[in-house]
Amino acid sequence: MTILDAVADPALFASAFPHTESWDAWRTFLAACFGLPMAKEQLGLYRQHTGRQSVPTSPAREAWLVVGRRGGKSRIAALVAVYLACFRSYVDVLAPGERGTLPIIAADRRQARTVFRYVNGLLDGCRMLASTSPGELSPPEC
């Protein structure tokens, strides 16, 4: 399942990311970031905002974004974190019994708490993932 499949699935994250113009732009970013095929509309949006003609065909190892206030950065960061934590396997890099850690770096503690709340909201809002024990999640140090 790709991150775009997860965002489109009503049983997962569709209600958190409705089909509006702003989230459509973020879907294009996610397609580029994860090296996924793009629809015709996404190709146009990608080319318009990046000035590039060729699209990524493999996942990015790192992404740097310039996004304004209230642009959705924290919600997308939470989505990517939940997707990577819940829908990817790390058996090839973790030793038996080792617990993986997925850091989310924020500018300050307040922003870190916001992203953490979005992560919890995505998990709690999905029946399949709501069974994830809240005790296993550690809030940002305050």
Image (cartoon, rainbow, N blue to C red):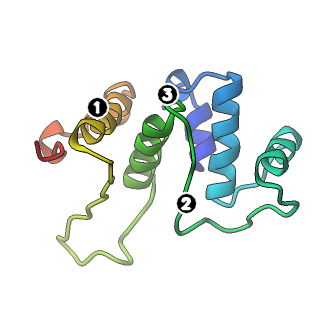
Disc 2 versus disc 1: nearer the observer: 2
Q: Quadrant of the C terminus?
A: top left
Q: What's the residue type where badge 1 is placed?
A: Arg
- The crowding category of the residue bearing disc 1, from other C-alpha atoms within 10 Å (few below 14, some 14 to 19, many at least 20), is some
Residue ID at (32%, 54%): 105
Instruction: Label 3: state its secondary structure.
Output: loop
Q: Which residue is mark 2?
A: 63
Q: Is residue 23 left or right of residue 119?
A: right
Numbered badge on residue 13? none
Q: Which residue is mark 1?
A: 117
Q: Which residue is mark 3?
A: 70
Label pair 2/3, CB-CB below 8 angstroms: no
- The crowding category of the residue bearing disc 2, from other C-alpha atoms within 10 Å (few below 14, some 14 to 19, many at least 20), is few
* Spatial CA span between label 1 and label 3: 16 Å
Can you give x and y, in whole percent of width and height, for residue 39 in the image? 83, 43
Disc 2 versus disc 3: nearer the observer: 3
Residue ID at (43%, 54%): 84
Q: Check the image and report above or below for 75 versus 97.
A: above
Q: Check the image and report above or below for 121 versus 2.
A: above
Can you give x and y, in whole percent of width and height, for residue 65 in the image? 56, 51
Taking depth in this image into account, of 128 and 47 the one nearest to the observer is: 47
Query: Along the polypeptide, which appears first: circle 1 or circle 3?
Result: 3
Can you give x and y, in whole percent of width and height, for residue 19 in the image? 67, 23
Residue ID at (88%, 60%): 53
Q: What's the residue type where badge 2 is placed?
A: Ala
Q: Is residue 44 left or right of residue 138?
A: right
Taking depth in this image into account, of 30 and 53 the one nearest to the observer is: 53
Q: What's the residue type where badge 3 is placed?
A: Arg
Taking depth in this image into account, of 26 and 136 the one nearest to the observer is: 26
The answer to which quarter of the image holds residue 14 is top right
Query: Along the polypeptide, which appears first: circle 2 or circle 3?
Result: 2
* Spatial CA span between label 2 and label 3: 19 Å
